[in-house]
Amino acid sequence: MQAKEIFKIIEKDFSKKLACKWDPTGYQYGKPTTQVSKILVALDLTTTVIKKAIAENVNLIITHHPFVFNKLKQEKQDITKKPIFQLLDQYQIVVYATHTNYDSQLATGMNSLILQNLGCQNITNLTHDNVTKQGRLPTPLSYQDIITKLKNIFQIPVVQHNINDLTTKITTIAICTGAGGSVIQRLTDKIDLFITGEIKWNEWLKFDEQQIPVACFNHYMEDYYTNHFSEYLMGKLPKTIEIIPYHIKNIINYY
């Protein structure tokens, strides 16, 4: 099966029309006509990831975050990316990304899946925001219970939060994985907890002014994608194509 045929299958379920305007999701690099026998799935394309792909004779790398965000000529001059481009050329590896089009999918996107994992029901898009999702717990849980669950889900031991009483029980949760602090500009719905991965100080102030409780993990929370998207591909593609989930290291340390 050619890489471009795999792209069509993915885009039927995760249309690029769902992606944010700024997001260069989809085909990234390489020859779309490449015959694919092995796919490596990872959060990002790094030196470690490309070396793993080479060792496994992978033809296609699919990441959550796009590797090529700017014009290709400009990206190829980036000193951190230049060696990776050289290896992609040398080993004829194709690169593809499913980013906000994956996050935005209501039924099977990452934000919805995490809410389901917490036990939420009636999951919908946040008003004025197709990426952020919100849901309701059928039985109220305390902030402490929810955060403990999330720590286990994301394998992240520490969380930033602005919650005064962690024993308070709640029902309504909204989530935007990754850098979701800007959601405060569009947050008109009444929620008990907002979950995200990155927030700037001025955004923390705005959440505080509006008295919106926040639990902020780091961006690595999105490594949740690696297993789920690998499972999705296993269910969609011929069994002759091997899917290899690869978890990059959480480079944020805690002391």
Image: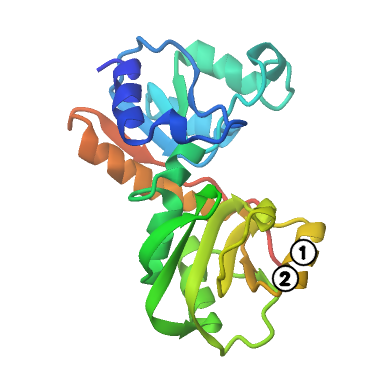
Q: CA distance from mark 2 to mark 1?
A: 6 Å
The percent position of residue 247, horizontal first and vertical second, equals 47, 47
> Which disc is residue 206 wearing?
1
Can residue 250 be seen?
no
Residue highlighted by disc 2: 210
Name the amino acid type tagged 1: Lys
Q: Is residue 9 left or right of residue 164?
A: left
Quadrant of the rendered structure where residue 10 is? top left
Q: Is residue 45 above or below residue 112?
A: above
The percent position of residue 117, horizontal first and vertical second, equals 37, 65
The percent position of residue 196, horizontal first and vertical second, equals 60, 59
> Which disc is residue 61 wearing?
none
Q: Which residue is nearer to you in this view: 19 or 167?
A: 19
Split into 4 quadrants, where in the image is the N terminus? top left
The percent position of residue 212, horizontal first and vertical second, equals 66, 72
Secondary structure type for disc 1: helix
Q: Is residue 10 left or right of residue 79?
A: left
Secondary structure type for disc 2: loop
Q: Residue lying furthest left in this view?
A: 239
Residue shown at 55% from the left, 71% from the top: 191
Q: Which residue is nearer to you in this view: 109 or 30?
A: 109
Q: Is residue 34 left or right of residue 62?
A: left
Q: How is the image coloured?
A: rainbow
Residue shown at 40% from the left, 75% from the top: 137
Q: Which residue is nearer to you in this view: 151 or 243?
A: 151
| Marks 2 and 1 in Cβ contact (< 8 Å) | yes
Local packing at callout 1 (Cα closer than 10 Å; few below 14, some 14-19, many 20+) is some
Residue shown at 56% from the left, 31% from the top: 66
Name the amino acid type tagged 2: Gln
Q: Is residue 121 above or below residue 60?
A: below
